[in-house]
Amino acid sequence: MAYTLEQRQAEIAKVLDQVDRKRAMLAERLLAGELDLDAARARNAGMPGVLGARWAEFIELPPGEQVAAMREPRFRGMSWQSLLQCSPFLPSGA
């Protein structure tokens, strides 16, 4: 099935909206103190490569800096779209 430009743009907008919602949810939960950083560290320990390294850096930030980072489109040069695909905080498929 061939997609029109408008259809592709609509699909991209859906993905970006989903990423924004996940970022907002994660920031809200971080602010509320609902997340277990030790558990996130343990889950992240098995994540190889740059994604695991970026999450390790993120986990060690003070809470206010974590939330501020969630408001930016990228973290240490990595897009949140990529990072959220392997988040040690969010269940798979969330």
Image (cartoon, helix red, strand yellow):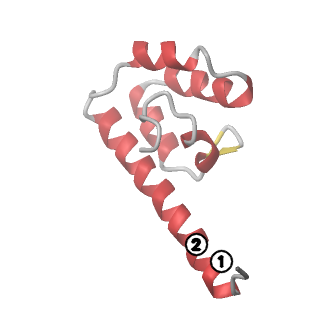
Q: Residue 8 is drawn in which quadrant? A: bottom right
In this view of the protein, which residue sits in the foreground, 13 or 73?
13
Q: What residue do we see at 39% from left, 50% from top?
A: 24
Quadrant containing the N terminus is bottom right
User: Which element is circle 1 on?
Assistant: helix
From the viewer's perspective, is 27 left or right of 9? left
Residue on which disc 1 sits = 8
Q: Which mark is residue 58?
A: none
From the viewer's perspective, is 34 left or right of 19? left
User: Which element is circle 2 on?
Assistant: helix
Mark 2 surroundings within 10 Å by alpha-carbon count, few (fewer than 14), some (14 through 19), many (20 or more) = few
Give me the C-alpha separation between circle 1 and circle 2: 5 Å
Residue 32, x across and y down, in percent = 25, 33
Mark 1 surroundings within 10 Å by alpha-carbon count, few (fewer than 14), some (14 through 19), many (20 or more) = few
Vertical arrangement, residue 2 with respect to residue 69, above or below: below
Vertical arrangement, residue 37 with respect to residue 12, above or below: above
Task: Check if mark 1's residue and mark 2's residue have beta carbons within 8 Å.
Answer: yes
Vertical arrangement, residue 5 with respect to residue 63, above or below: below
Residue 14, x across and y down, in percent = 51, 68
Residue 22, x across and y down, in percent = 43, 49
Task: Give the amino acid type for the residue marked by disc 2 in the picture.
Answer: Glu
From the viewer's perspective, is 21 left or right of 4? left
In this view of the protein, which residue sits in the foreground, 27 or 65?
27
Q: What residue do we see at 55% from left, 20% from top?
A: 44
Quadrant containing the C terminus is top left
Residue 55, x across and y down, in percent = 58, 27
Residue on which disc 2 sits = 11
